[in-house]
Each structure stands twice: as structure tokens, then as C-alpha cells.
Image: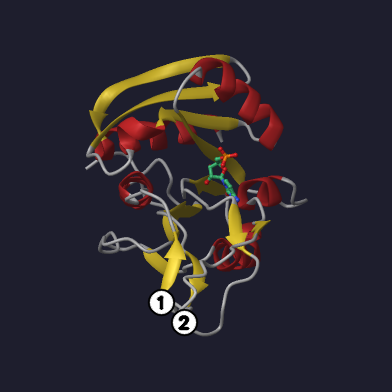
Amino acid sequence: FRPKILANKRVLVTAGPTFEPIDPVRGITNLSSGKMGYAIARAARQAGAEVTLVSGPTGLPAPYGVHRINVQTAQQMHDVVLSRAAGHEIFVAVAAVADWRIANASAQKLKKNEAGDVPQLQFEPNPDILAAVASLQNKPYCVGFAAESENLLEYGEAKRKRKGIPLLVGNIGHQTFGKDENELVLFDDKGHQSLPRADKQELARQLIGEIAARI
Ligand code: C5P
């Protein structure tokens, strides 16, 4: 239904939250629904690309024609993405990756005891998947997302530079998580540009157009 602007391109997308276990039945996650990342994977496929979607736990069905790989933790997402990134022309990091994982996760379910002791969780940092891909020798065109709650214009450009990527897409985190609509600001080396509030699938289609115009 549209020109195949990504024909013969391979696109790798991360989406959804990650889940960091505390014990076999508990864990830490976040409110990402996966909708924006899935919409981007779908739009890329509709634009003619071969699409791999590396997804944290979401309730969403895989978009038609998209190869989905399910993961739980940030480390698993990192390992899957890094083993595949070099074979792709475009990488879009949409996942809300947990910054930290639990260093002292328990192999057995934590039990309450008589004394009422509470678990003492310790954290350690997760790898930054986007920064790792952006520093590869043979890297795809890298697109990052930033969910900020304030000062989006200032933080957006700073984050683009810090991650070492050509395109960063900003949105206001608490206004997008779980919603069907979003509003994006694109940051590149020429400045910034807004994609006004619209359905996530429509924004994904516009974003794919912007990416195709830049590669
Ligand atoms: O630094 P911050 O988490 O705000 O950066 C967000 C961007 O970096 C998103 O594109 C996200 O998918 C990506 N990211 C990542 N691995 C992490 C943290 C963030 O790929 N550990």
C-alpha cells in the first residue's frame, strides 16, 4: 500500500520492557507495553524490510511477517541483539531496558520467616544495548528512543550525542507508556523536528519514512 522504501533492508528492533528476576516467581519490570516498538516493526515490514523483533514480555501478537525472538532479561536481549546486529542495515532500539538487574537473585523462592526479615536486594548495572551496537565496527544505522518526563529538547540532543547515534526519537515517557497515541521529537545532526500527536502505527509509518530518507 506504499512504496517499498525499505526493500532489501534488514531491520532489527527491540521492544517492550525487560524482566529482571528476584527469584523464580518474582521480578522487576516497567510499564512499557511494547506498542511503539511493535508498530515500528510492522511499519518496517510493510515498507518491504526483513524484520527481526527482539521483544521483552508483552501481551502483543507478533506483527505479520516479522520474525520475533522473545527474551526476558536485559542480558538476554543484549546477547540476542549483539549476535545479530552486524547483519542488519538498521537497528531501532525501542525497548525500555532495565538499567539494573538484581545481583543477588535467589535460585529458590524467597520465604517469609518468623522474625519478619525482609529481603535485601542488591543491584548491578545491565549492559547498554544501544551503545554497544553503536560502537560496533560494522554497525547498522542506529536509532534510539528516549522517554523523558521533562526538558525533552535539552536532554534529547544530549542523549543522542552520548549514545553516539545519528537519530534519537524523544517522547514524554509517562504520556506514552501503554497508550495507543504518542507524540515524537526527532533529533539528528541538523536539529530537531516534531511528529505531532497521532496513533502509534501512523507515527511508526512516518518514522520509517524519516529513517529511509536518512540511510
Ligand atoms: O539511557 P536511556 O535508557 O534513556 O536510553 C534509552 C535508549 O537506549 C532506548 O533506545 C533504549 O532502547 C536504549 N537502551 C538500551 N540498553 C539499555 C538502556 C537503554 O538499548 N541498557
Name the amino acid, label 2: Lys
| Position of residue 174 measured from the top left corner of the image (x, y, whole percent) | 35, 33
Instruction: Classify the position of ligand 1 by quadrant: top left, top right, bottom left or bottom right.
Output: top right
Q: How is the image coloured?
A: secondary structure
In-image side of 12 versus 61 (left or right): right
In-image side of 94 versus 127 (left or right): left
In-image side of 156 versus 86 (left or right): left
**Disc 2 and disc 1 in contact, CB within 8 angstroms:** yes
Badge 2 element = loop
Is residue 206 positioned above or below 54 on the image? above
Residue at the (54%, 31%) spot, across then down: 168
Counting other residues with Cα less than 10 Å from the Cα at mark 1, is it few (<14), some (14-19), or many (20 or more)? few
Give 72 or 201, whichever is nearer the viewer: 72
Badge 1 element = loop
Residue pointed to by mark 1: 25
Counting other residues with Cα less than 10 Å from the Cα at mark 2, is it few (<14), some (14-19), or many (20 or more)? few
Identity of the residue furthest to the front in this view: 115
Residue at the (27%, 44%) spot, across then down: 178
How far is disc 2 from disc 1 in space, using C-alphas?
7 Å
| Position of residue 214 measured from the top left corner of the image (x, y, whole percent) | 54, 30
Quadrant, the C terminus: top right
Circle number at residue 109: 2
Instruction: Report the number of discs.
Output: 2
Name the amino acid, label 1: Val
| Position of residue 107 measured from the top left corner of the image (x, y, whole percent) | 56, 83
Is residue 117 positioned above or below 165 on the image? below
Give 21 or 181, whichever is nearer the viewer: 21
Residue at the (67%, 55%) spot, across then down: 127
Q: Quadrant of residue 58?
A: bottom left
Quadrant, the N terminus: top left
In-image side of 159 versus 207 (left or right): right
Give 142 or 146, whichever is nearer the viewer: 146
